[in-house]
Amino acid sequence: MAAGPYNYSYIFKYIIIGDMGVGKSCLLHQFTEKKFMADCPHTIGVEFGTRIIEVSGQKIKLQIWDTAGQERFRAVTRSYYRGAAGALMVYDITRRSTYNHLSSWLTDARNLTNPNTVIFLIGNKSDLEAQRDVTYEEAKQFADENGLMFLECSAKTGDNVEDAFLDTAKKIYQNIQDGSLDLNAAESGVQHKPATPRTTLNTDQQPSDKGCAC
Amino acid sequence: MADTSTSSFAAGNVPASNPLSKKLNKILESRLDNDKDMLEALKALSTFFGENSLRTRRNLRSDIERRSLAINEEFLQTFQVVKNQLDSVYADVKAMNDCCQDMTTRLKNAKAQTHDLINQTTKLHGESQKLQMKQQVADTFLEKFQLKPDEIKSLRSTKSGALSQDFFQALARVKQIHTDCKILLRTNHQTAGLEIMESMALHQESSYERLYRWSQNECRMLTAESPDISPLLCQALQALQDRPVLFKYTLDEFGTARRTAVVRGLIDALTRGGPGGTPRPIELHSHDPLRYVGDMLAWLHQATASEKEYLQTLLKRCEHFVRIYKGGMFDADTDKLVIIGATDDTIQDILGHITEGVCRPFKVRVEQVLVSEQDAVTLYKLNNLLKFYHHTIGQIINPDAALLSTIMEIQDLSHRMFFNSLTCTANKLLDKVELPPADLGPTASLLHTMSLLKDVLQCHDSSVVTLENKKQDFKQILSCVLDPLLQMCNVSASRLSTVDMAAYMVNCIYSMQTTIALYEFTDTRQEMLSAQVDAHLDAMISEQAAFVLNRVDLAQIYGTIQQHQPKMGPLSSIQGLDPLTVKSAMNKFDSYLASPDSLTLPQCSLITSSKNRELIKKNSADLICQSYKLMYEAICDPKNEYREYQSIVPRTPDQVVKLLT
């Protein structure tokens, strides 16, 4: 009875970015509630959702910050990149313009997050095959060129949504596993705690948990 | 036998009448061979009567008697044995009888004796059953109302002070027993009830105290950036709900630990940035006020959301109706804590406490930014940003939380600073009133202020606050900028001629109108401005009309005609209205009609708005037409005695209208 869903070892902070109307909030809703939100209102500033997942037997809590795509919120949403371990960059496969803006989003993501942040490219609305405006191959090539992970998803049908969030988490986890070495080597002399940003570490420091004699 | 034989002898000789003969007959008649007894007797006689002699015959009788005696004696002897045996049997039977009787008596005695015993046994048996029942009851009672040794053990503190699952189970049992005692108190077992209750209360107290110490320690250690809240701690808080004071203290402890963590987190984010310096420290952007303040606010928003999550995790097991004890209020009647607010309130209270710590470092920094910022547009953007975050963070935390009131204060400050800056700019205009330029257009300072206003209104386009807010702001901004501007215009125009002033004012106000026309919520202002423009335009229109009439010498004539009354006699007889004068003026007017644009006020062509220019032209022409109509009608009127009036006013008013419009 004790364990419950709250016992997680890590918290990963995600940020979802992309143009207005590409379905960022719907993706989040589909991921956290497993439901499609048909009349999703425009996001005001930022909103956030959480869900606990399991990666390699570790419970991980995802804290996902969903940003507004509207230009007028750009200044506000930029402040939320800070400390994100994963960035989901979303475009709409039926609207070429949203794809064309990716490079500007990517620039933001690269500039405002840390080098270890995992950036995942998501082509949303894959259920609307008939209206497709951006081919899979083209986006895949863009992702490869920029070292991004990539999937086409549908927030409506839920297709691949789970995978996008989970794959990102797996990658981050993997970075933690082998990344600590990496970081120490790369920036010698700088002392810092965990490998990844605020994907903080609760696990290892538990033994004292029951040990406070006083 | 002898008799028989004798008589049979006699019977053959003597008749029957004689007794003797009778007897004889009888003997004779008797058939010896049929008489078995006789035969037997004779047979027996023959055994010992061997010799038939007198003596033997004489002795026969005695012999027989002797023999009979011997036989009887033998008989007697034989029966003597039987008798003896019977006697012994008798004795035996008698003995048996005695024995039986004895036994019966004894049995009777025994029975009499055991009756008591049996009664006693039955009684005892009954008692034993009762006792057994009692024992069962007592066992059940004990089981229900006493703690098992291992339960007591798990309640007692261990050396390490650690808690286990058993502790909570035992605690729950103590509580159950304590509650059950209330039932006991309602029955006859009040003493037991009270005693048990008391002992359970003692157990409870010590356990709660132990639980409290443990929880307090656990909470105290939750100072990591993202704390690990163990399930046991959640359970502990659930249990502590029964002791609102301890519950509150524990939560306070948690709040204090988190508060420290959040403050440290903010300072780290400000000065150290992420691990290895990425993302970069927020303070690196302090030269960019919007980014600097925005980053801090976003950080606070995220931190608040996270802290709320931790609190919800911590209190997830606590029931919603359970409330927290606030500030020492006791109900005198029940001696119970008066409970106020629900779990959500609890969370809000603690969250307010947690986020209170960052208020100061945050406030100091933002205030510094605001105070050193001069630019109204930036200040306004900051104000909007603060408003946005006040709203956004307000969705997570109660409005009365210190963090929100701090943001509100800063927002107020930014609001004030912004309007200060605006007012300052506006006041500068008034301090040093520029003279209207030769072209009567808006002054440079006015244009400059207008572009500032435009920038301010513009930045609302990209702002993130609600429309209602925007409406309110705009109203204030407009009056803050436009009112002094209008005043300045009036002051600078004060030394001008009427026409110049009107033209100048029309131009100035027009430039304001065009600036604000692009934005919403400016309708009222625009109405006001256009009313003022209209007034100035009217002045210009009548000036223009008067100018024309003056130039064709009709002004005097028109004025007199207007004031003329029938009793004053015919118009033609009045001085200055003689047909000649009128005719020459009308001739001039006619030449004006040939080229109407020749008689335009120079100020009219300085009006920047073509629409206004057209309006002046058209309305002044209308005015002239009206005047002409009045004069025409007066001159054509026979009462006024103009002869050949057709030569004086050759054109009908309709013709004039056609020519002028």
Image (spheres, grey):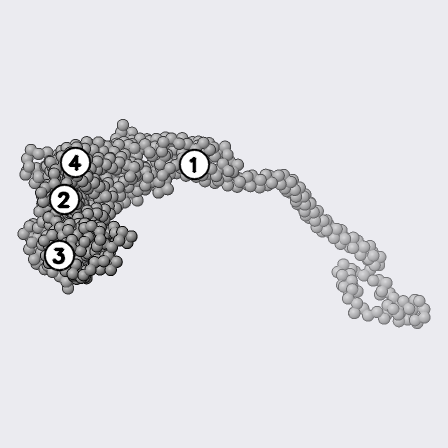
Residue at 86 percent of width and 65 percent of height = B6
Q: Is residue B512 left or right of residue B29?
A: left
Residue type (three-letter) at the residue carrying disc 3? Asn
Q: Residue furthest right?
A: B17
Q: Secondary structure at mark 3?
A: helix
Residue type (three-letter) at the residue carrying disc 4? Leu
Residue at 16 percent of width and 61 percent of height = B647
Q: Position of residue A19 (x, y in %)?
A: 14, 52
Residue carrying label 3: B587
Residue carrying label 4: B430
Residue carrying label 2: B500
Q: Chain of mark 2?
A: B
Label whose residue precedes the other's in the sequence (3 or 1):
1
Residue B305 appears in which quarter of the rendering? top left
Residue type (three-letter) at the residue carrying disc 1? His
Would you call the spot at circle 3 few (<14 residues within 10 Å), some (14-19), or many (20 or more)?
some
